[in-house]
Image (cartoon, rainbow, N blue to C red):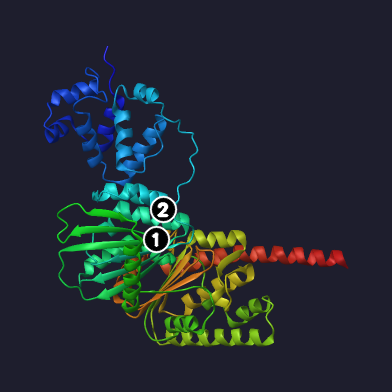
Amino acid sequence: MATPNKNLKAIFEYLGLTNLAVAKALAIDPSLISRYLSGHRQFKVASPQMDAIADYILTSSKRAQDVEWLKERFTEAGLPTDMSTVRSFKQNLILWLATDGDILRRSLGSAPITNIQKPATPQTVFNRTHGAAKHGYLELLFALEPVLSAQKQGETIDIFLSSDRIRTIINGDISSLLQNALAKRDLHIRMIVCVSGDTQALSEILDAYIEPIVSGHVQLLVVHGLTQTVTNQLHMIFPDGNAVLVTETIENDATPVSVFITDPDFIAGMQRSFEATSRFAQPILNIYDDNYSRNILEILYMEFCTPGALDVVKDSINPMYMPMSAYDRFLKTRGHDADEYTWRSTEFVRFKSGMDNNLEQGVEFREVLSLKRLNDIAQRGLCRMAGLYFMERGYIELDAEGCAAILKGYIEYLENVPSFNLLILDDISDLQQNSCWHLKQGRSLCINNWQAKDPVMIYSDQTMLLREFGARFDALWAQGAGGVGSRANVMSILQDVTERLEKTIRHERHICEANEEATL
């Protein structure tokens, strides 16, 4: 009795392949494919059609998730774990598909998957990939993955694009691979882009890398003016003295070709050229760490206190809506000496007065808060926020009394200032979590990101970024704006959270009083 080839059937079903399509593409009799699937004909490693079918499956596995799915199947089958090249991956695929693959693997003495191998150095990994050109995204993906995994924590990778129309940089698998490496190893990228005037092309790059841009892991610089060229190229320079060169045709009518380079003189020349280009490139955004500086405060002053509408998405609450007395109360808990306290209090008065004057002139403010975050604040009786709001470094925990004061401030502005609008959504997107976006319409963008060990502020006055982030804010605002009675509903939610915080405040005061009585 024939035993169906369950692995071949599984990959056909997963990739949506049909007997007829595969047979037609490979010039094979469709009945032969059917017999392989049903097990009426053994699909062995040495079968004449094995190589062609394996290549067809690899070509059809265009997404990173397809590759990961196959890797999981190989691991389950106890196949070798070294899959760092297309060749080794194809060998695994053949052994997995073949009806005699398991017997052959055991006879060859394949190492068990539990073997612990010595971690490869970046240079070792590069030496493996150095040699023949890699064709297409899949081969580049396989070759690039171990290189990125071998990078040290916190390193910076330099990327130069000879045109913003290069498709490799926005390929979903390549961009996901780069961003996963940035997140896992805290890597950073300096990306210089030669802009062609094709706003759609640069917009696609921004869209593909929006999360690491927001987190400050990608610094984007642009060079204007592009001469006609024969090909477009992507240069990726690693800090360990290796590089990758990807070349594409202008019309993207052929698969890209990539070469992994180890020649030290060539790479040194590339690095010198990159640094020279970076000096003339225009930053599309500026990234500030949380070292306190006057210019950061002035950026915030410009957003809140100068004419022009302001849109804010905040995964927290905004101290700008605290009464001055409440702000001063919390300042006194920070242990500043008299002079330090005075200038901070004076700065807040300057900000508060400027914002109030703006709103009195009818300037429109729109702010979005997360109900999930508000509930978290009510439950914890604390709100974690950047120390910048109190002219400090790092993060601070604003106490329950301070949080309640802010929420009461929101309610007061909603009651008395028609141009102040607040929207509370059940939750905001992953992109906006642990951050605060300020969009001064038509003028600037400021993002405070709180996911890193230390706060990061990103600032830009580039039209392209303003348009991208403005569109995202408008889409977010459209989720809940304009509902009947929405203003009253927002105030009701804020009042509920305030009452829960005040309950915490009363409880804490009761504990303090009890402790004081116990010590007397």
Residue count near mark 1 (Cα–Cα under 10 Å), binned few <14, some 14–19, many ≥20: some
- In the image, 48: left or right of 377? left
- In the image, 388: left or right of 207? right
The reply to whether residue 362 is visible in this rendering is yes
Kindly state the secondary structure of the residue where label 2 is placed.
helix
The reply to whether residue 485 is visible in this rendering is no
- In the image, 35: left or right of 456? left
Observer-nearest residue: 504 or 15? 15
Residue 93 is drawn in which quadrant? top left
Decide: is 409 above or below 482: below
Q: Residue at label 2?
A: 123
Report the quarter where the N terminus lies: top left
Observer-nearest residue: 489 or 290? 290
Decide: is 74 above or below 408: above
Q: Position of residue 402 (x, y in %)?
A: 61, 72
Residue 62 is drawn in which quadrant? top left
Label 2 or label 1, whichever comes before in sequence order: 2
The amino acid at mark 1 is Gly
Kindly state the secondary structure of the residue where label 1 is placed.
loop
Kindly identify the residue that appears in the image at 45 percent across and 51 percent down: 121
Q: Position of residue 79 (x, y in %)?
A: 39, 31
The amino acid at mark 2 is Gln
Q: Residue at label 1?
A: 241
Q: Kindly give the residue lying farthest to the right in the view shown.
A: 520
Which numbered dot is residue 422? none
Report the quarter where the C terminus lies: bottom right
- Cα distance between the residues tagged 2 and 1: 8 Å
Marks 2,1: beta carbons within 8 A: yes
Kindly identify the residue that appears in the image at 20 percent across and 69 percent down: 198
Q: Position of residue 158 (x, y in %)?
A: 36, 65
Residue count near mark 2 (Cα–Cα under 10 Å), binned few <14, some 14–19, many ≥20: some
